[in-house]
Image (tube, rainbow, N blue to C red):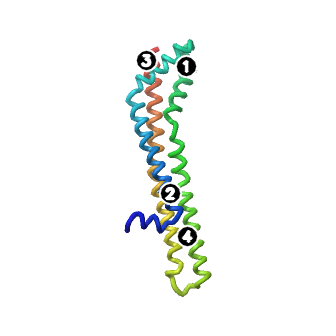
Amino acid sequence: MDLLAYIDRGGAIAYFLLILNIIGFSVIIWKAIVLYISKSNTKALALDILDTLKTSSQEPTIQNIESKINTKIQKIEFGLNSIKIIATISPLIGLLGTVIGILAAFDAISVAGLGDPSIFSSGISVALITTITGLIVAIPHYIAYNYFIGVLDSIEIHLKEEILARI
């Protein structure tokens, strides 16, 4: 079956999930690049934090260093919530499509009766397609989000080690 025909059978919900998937993968690619650059430049990030502390005439105390590291990590982390939200709501949107499809199937049965099973099959088809699509969208976003959080934790640890080695 052609992918567009499959999505078309899922209706508006499947198209909405497709749009979420495109947005989510764009953010995933962007964050993968940002995290790769940040992870390979932890020394430069650490020097930048130390320079910021020196120019602001703050003492390099543990609290000040932690604060600056947290600020830097939050800047790198920007955008990850979008991935998390897409991973969280996609199965729910798929479930909404399931309910709409089942409702359409029961409406068809109430109008035409149980004589012809093909009457309610389109509603069941919508239900299954939207459920599958919601899960297909959610799973890679969930994996990417958790992987990126692990990379961020690693960057934070390396930043702390780098800064402590320099003070």
Looking at this rendering, what residue extends furthest in the bottom direction? Answer: 115
Please provide percent x and percent y for residue 134.
50, 58
Q: Name the residue located 41 percent from the left edge and 26 percent from the top edge.
A: 42
Residue to which mark 4 is pinned: 101
**In this rendering, is residue 68 above or below 94?**
above
> According to the image, label 2 marks what residue?
17
Helix, strand or loop status at disc 2: helix
Label 4 element class: helix
Per the image, label 1 sits on a secondary structure element best described as: helix
Q: How far apart are marks 3 and 4 (CA)?
A: 60 Å
Q: Which amino acid does label 4 sit on?
A: Gly
Measured Cα–Cα span from mark 1 to mark 4: 57 Å
- State yes or no: discs 1 and 4 in contact (Cβ < 8 Å): no
Q: Position of residue 91 (x, y in %)?
A: 53, 57
Q: Residue 62 carries which label?
A: 1
Name the N-terminal-most of marks 1 and 4. Answer: 1
